[in-house]
Image: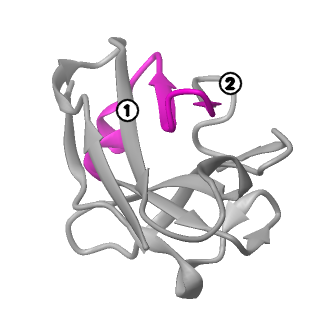
Amino acid sequence: QVRLVESGGGSVQAGGSLRLSCAVSVYSGPSYSNYCMGWFRQAPGKEREGVAGIGSAGGTSYGDSVKGRFTISRDNAKNTLYLQMDSLKSEDTGMYYCAASLICRSNYPARNRANWGQGTQVTVSS
């Protein structure tokens, strides 16, 4: 059983930066370092999309719209996942969710086999 808690969201002007964090508690089974982790986002009226993913070995993947602006990282000693978001745009607005799965697909946690956090809101004004 895994619990994920996101933090760091907020309101920022276009061009600004935010750093999201996801604190992970693992109550049973494999440790955090074995999990494939990822950030997903959902804007009103749109489907949830993958933003960035990081595998247990550290390999990363990014959505096309965030490449070069966002950086995903993990600290296995702190059981924490991060998303550094720079050069934010209005289209980055949405609810950001952290996900964890022991099944990894192209460095993203498998959505249908993932544990999810409650989300943190990011609002970028132009």
**Left or right relative to 58: residue 101:** left
Tell me where residue 46 appears, x and y as whole percent.
Answer: 33, 73
Q: In the rendered structure, find residue 1 and report the number of the disc placed on it.
A: none
* Local crowd size for mark 1, using a 10 Å CA cut-off: few (<14), some (14–19), many (≥20): many
The amino acid type, in three-letter code, at marker 1 is: Ser
Residue in the picture at 49% in, 31% down: 83
Give the side of residue 125 with respect to residue 25, left or right. Answer: left
Q: What residue is pinned by disc 1?
A: 21
- Look at discs 1 and 2 and give the one toward the viewer: 1
Residue at 63% of width from left, 55% of height from top? 31
Is 26 included in the stretch rendered in magenta?
no
The mark nearer the N terminus, 1 or 2, is: 1
- C-alpha span from label 1 to label 2: 19 Å
Helix, strand or loop at mark 1? strand
Q: Position of residue 25 (x, y in %)?
A: 39, 52
Judging by the rendered image, the residue that carries numbered circle 2 is 68
Q: Which residues are magenta?
A: 74-96
Q: Residue at x 58, y 37 (%)?
A: 66
Three-letter amino acid code of the residue under disc 2: Gly
